[in-house]
Image (cartoon, grey):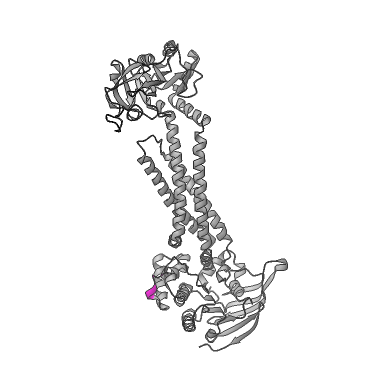
């Protein structure tokens, strides 16, 4: 029987998430509904502390929700149990604000990590990692350690790492906030060109209004809720 | 991922070397102190192991260890010879006697008197002369360590090095002339006294006058005879104590273990080595985990499960453990080798290597355990905190 293709990348309804309990309880998400379609680049924007990072953590399955439902490619993350880690490794890619590149590894080794986690051979992983580095224009810096790279170069290595295993959903947290305008634009172009296709989606949390024009839709958050969702024609 | 785990570890040079240093120190201290302890304990029963021929040692029932001499009457030798299953039985004198050196100083020597006819119980290795030379007038054989050190003759020139005692030299043992006819090699004694071999009759002449002078009776069992049963028969028929050589060795060993401060002194050093090594290695390894927590979280977010991270951390801790163990044991061996010719008692056995290895593995597992707990509890969402 042919497997039914998922209709949306992300389908969230009534997500509630709080931190701590009792009087110090903080409601981070107060019933969030969100859909992300295949082939879409969605920006999540809003003031600090509004719940953006909590929302992408829940979507990525690295944080458990309290109430509601979150389906990623038709898989209920909260019901997956032990298989969640494997699902995440196969289907999700991450780009972090502070890059989180392992400082003792070279660029190509860093990029190869997701493949090694999935059990691919070293040889195959390094070959694919080298290809990805070429795609982000860093083929000549493959053997450099993160400390030997500029901020923009490190972010491009992080993007290559997020994409090397061809995930269907890439989640980025402030990918351009530590970069200058020109480098930020370049990073976004790479992300849009390499991470998006009709079967893949991209969610980016950002404060950086300079990159708003790259989005297909912009979801604005405030106080744990999505207040507006605007569609726009991405450049 | 194992290669990545090793790169994470080795790439942080300071911590990597710190953990190895801690483990090397622990391994060195545990191995070295335990080897000295074993060497020292081996010396307590060296005389028994050197005398390989007899199967059974017969002695006064009150004797607790090899140096606890309670002399027997000479006639008791004949009683032992009369027990069924005894092939031969010979007398052995063992006592501490004063030797007067050429410079007028006195030195206590461990004098061993062998059966005049057979010389059974002689040294296992002769360096100069022959054992049969003991049949010559006033003859003695001296161990090489004693000849080189405590019994050495004064320097030929003022300020020069003392001259080792050699064949042809004379000593005065308890006012009796003794001529060195050979130099032998024996196990060092517990108190490091020189060992002097002579015949039983001559030893009793050297010894101060006492009614009884027979220290031990050495017995060989008839071939095929059960040693335990023969010991029991000797005890029954003579009223003396009789032990198989191995059992007498254990008796001596146990006496020193129970009645001296040696085990506790060395035990403390070994435990201290373990604790300090564990503290240094554990603390450094924990710091390494803490500093890499963000990266472990990143691996977790990217799909690395707890089992994979556990294996990575175990590999890291076992690799530093193996290196630290190798360096420590190597250092201890070099120490023992370099000081091999001195008074140092050092005996590195396979069991000690296993003990030291076990201790290092334990330290590694403890260190890893602390880190593993942290990793297991780690929320991968930490990666989104800048």
Q: Is residue B202 visible?
A: yes
Residue A79 falls left or right of residue B159: right
Residue B62 is inside the magenta segment: no
Residue A42: name its quadrant. Answer: bottom right
Q: Is residue B223 visible?
A: no
- Position of the C terminus of chain B by quadrant: bottom right
Residue A107: name its quadrant. Answer: bottom left
Q: Position of residue B85 (x, y in %)?
A: 42, 16
Residue shown at 54% from the left, 57% from the top = B372
Q: Is residue B347 above or below residue B152?
A: below
Q: Is residue A100 above or below residue B103?
A: below
What's the magenta region?
A139-144
Residue A140 is inside the magenta segment: yes
Residue A52 falls left or right of residue B151: right
Report the residue that reaches farthest toward the right. Answer: A23
Q: Is residue B260 above or below residue A126?
A: above
Q: Position of residue B285 (x, y in %)?
A: 50, 56
Of residues A36 and B126, the one drawn nearer to the viewer in this rendering:
B126
């Amino acid at each position: 029987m042919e497997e039914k293709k998922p209709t949306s990348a992300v389908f969230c309804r009534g997500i509630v998430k709080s931190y701590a309990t009792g009087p110090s309880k903080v409601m981070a998400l107060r019933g969030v509904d969100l859909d992300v379609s295949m082939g879409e680049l969605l920006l999540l924007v809003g003031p600090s502390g509004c719940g953006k990072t909590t929302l992408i953590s829940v979507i990525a399955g690295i944080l458990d929700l309290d109430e509601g439902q979150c389906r990623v490619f038709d898989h209920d993350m909260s019901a997956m149990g032990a298989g969640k880690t494997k699902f995440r490794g196969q289907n999700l890619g991450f780009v972090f604000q502070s890059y989180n590149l392992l400082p003792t590894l070279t660029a190509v080794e860093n990029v190869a990590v997701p493949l090694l986690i999935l059990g691919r051979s070293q040889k195959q992983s390094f070959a694919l990692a080298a290809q990805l580095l070429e795609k982000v224009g860093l083929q000549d810096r493959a053997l450099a350690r993160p400390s030997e790279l500029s901020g923009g170069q490190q972010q491009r290595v992080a993007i290559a790492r997020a994409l090397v295993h061809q995930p269907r959903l890439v989640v980025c947290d402030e990918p351009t906030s530590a970069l200058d305008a020109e480098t930020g634009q370049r990073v976004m172009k790479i992300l849009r060109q390499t991470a998006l296709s009709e079967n893949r989606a991209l969610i980016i949390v950002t404060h950086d209004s300079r990159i708003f024009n790259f989005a297909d839709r912009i979801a604005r958050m405030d106080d744990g809720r999505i207040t507006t969702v605007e569609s726009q024609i991405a450049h | 991922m194992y290669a990545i785990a090793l790169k994470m570890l080795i790439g942080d040079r300071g911590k990597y070397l710190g953990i190895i240093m801690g483990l090397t120190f622990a391994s060195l201290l545990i191995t070295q102190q335990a080897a000295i302890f074993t060497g020292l304990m081996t010396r307590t029963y060296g005389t028994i192991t050197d005398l390989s021929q007899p199967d059974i040692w017969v002695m006064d029932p009150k004797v607790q260890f090899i140096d606890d001499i309670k002399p027997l009457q000479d006639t008791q030798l004949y009683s032992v010879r009369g027990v069924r299953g005894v092939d031969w039985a010979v007398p052995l004198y063992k006592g501490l006697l004063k030797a007067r050196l050429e410079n007028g100083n006195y030195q206590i020597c461990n004098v061993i008197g062998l059966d005049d006819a057979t010389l059974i119980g002689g040294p296992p290795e002769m360096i100069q002369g022959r054992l049969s030379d003991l049949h010559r007038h006033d003859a003695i054989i001296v161990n090489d360590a004693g000849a080189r050190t405590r019994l050495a003759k004064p320097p030929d020139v003022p300020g020069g090095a003392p001259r080792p005692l050699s064949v042809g030299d004379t000593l005065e043992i308890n006012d009796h002339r003794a001529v060195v006819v050979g130099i032998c090699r024996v196990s060092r004694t517990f108190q490091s006294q020189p060992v002097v071999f002579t015949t039983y009759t001559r030893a009793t002449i050297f010894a101060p006058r006492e009614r009884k002078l027979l220290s031990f009776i050495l017995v060989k069992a008839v071939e095929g005879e059960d040693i335990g049963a023969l010991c029991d028969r000797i005890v029954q028929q003579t009223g003396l104590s009789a032990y198989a050589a191995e059992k007498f060795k254990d008796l001596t060993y146990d006496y020193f273990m129970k009645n001296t401060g040696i085990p506790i002194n060395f035990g403390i050093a070994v435990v201290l080595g373990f604790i300090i090594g564990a503290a240094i290695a554990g603390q450094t390894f924990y710091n390494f985990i803490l500093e890499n927590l963000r990266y472990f979280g990143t691996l977790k977010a990217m799909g690395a499960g707890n089992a994979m991270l556990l294996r990575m951390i175990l590999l890291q801790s076992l690799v530093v453990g193996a290196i630290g163990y190798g360096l420590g044991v190597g250092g201890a061996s070099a120490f023992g080798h370099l000081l091999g010719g001195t008074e140092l008692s050092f005996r590195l056995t396979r069991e000690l290597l296993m003990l030291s290895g076990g201790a290092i593995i334990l330290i590694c597992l403890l260190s890893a355990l602390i880190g593993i707990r942290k990793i297991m509890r780690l929320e991968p969402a930490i990666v989104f905190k800048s």
